[in-house]
Image: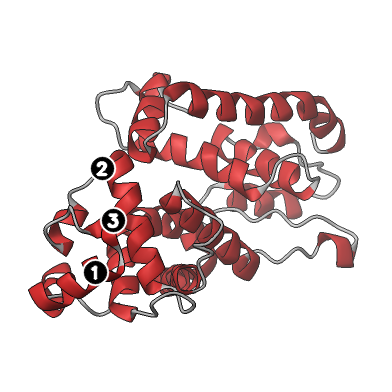
Amino acid sequence: MGITPQELDELVDEERWGQWCLAEPDLAGVGSLQAVRELRGEAEDQALGALLRLAATDGHDEQLAAVAVLHQLGGSVRTIARHFWHLAGGDVEGIVVGAAWEQIRSYDWRSRRRHHASAIHHGTRKAVRATLMPDTSRSLGRRVVLLNPQSWVFAALAEHDETPGMSMSLDAFDSRDQLTIFLNWAAGQGVIDDEEIALLDALMDLDRHNAQIPKWLRGACSMAAVERMASERGICTKSVSRARDKVLAKLREAASTFLEEVA
């Protein structure tokens, strides 16, 4: 957005912050915009909801509040950008920030009272996915699976194309690319939706950056990732586990069909 948190704090001075607190009483207990960035759990969710009401065009239409929300959700923006970077290269951050900005400015604050960060994350991810991964499978009569271009999968595909009569097996891909193919297939078949993919992706991302967990224990089923997500969203671990287990149950049920069609 071309503005640092420090520069934003200078623009949102005591007078402007006081005006925001009068407009949104949920901010009254927080001393400053800088203090909002230090909040976690339910307190963060409450303050974020107040900032979103300030930022929405049908709310108080405060663009500085929208910038403040983007700063607050910087980790979410980076997570989405990392997921789609191979589809847009150096432009991915601009695409994600633009999508997040639209979600913030058009936020449906009247119907949503909790889990604001999750709502913006899922809405942004869905918008970016629609931009970078349009559904061509129905119109063209075939399914398109997009993979990381730095993956050795492309070398395998090139080798396959140069070898007449050779059939490409799922075994030719490593486990990460097999998972990507499976999830893309599941989404295309309507087995799971974008929010469910985002849940698994967020859990795995939390584990991926936890140096205390051995690599062989990392993944969507890690309790450490579940506990951390529950803490960040201000909900109980059972809620996260239950939602994750529902997604995994759908994938397990669809696995046999996937293997028949693709493998």
**Label 2 – label 3 distance at C-alpha:** 15 Å
Image label count:
3
The type of residue carrying mark 2 is Arg
Quick one: label 2 or label 3, which is nearer the N terminus? 3
The type of residue carrying mark 1 is Leu
- Residue at coordinates 70% horizontally, 53% vertically from top-left? 145
Identify the residue under disc 2.
40
**Label 1 – label 3 distance at C-alpha:** 9 Å
Circle 3 crowding by C-alpha within 10 Å: few under 14, some 14–19, many from 20: some
> Residue 187: horizontal and vertical position, in percent?
72, 46
Frontmost of labels 2 and 1 is: 1
Identify the residue under disc 1.
22
- Residue at coordinates 45% horizontally, 46% vertically from top-left? 115
> Residue 111: horizontal and vertical position, in percent?
56, 57
Query: What element does badge 1 sit on?
Result: helix
Q: Is residue 4 at least partly visible in the picture?
A: no
The vertical placement of 216 against 194, above or below, is above
- Residue at coordinates 65% horizontally, 65% vertically from top-left? 130
Identify the residue under disc 3.
26
The one nearer the camera, 254 or 120, is 120
Position of the C terminus by quadrant: top right
Quick one: label 2 or label 1, which is nearer the N terminus? 1
Query: What element does badge 2 sit on?
Result: loop
Mark 2 touches mark 3? (CB < 8 Å): no
Position of the N terminus by quadrant: bottom left
Of the numbered discs in the image, which one, if any, rests on residue 171? none
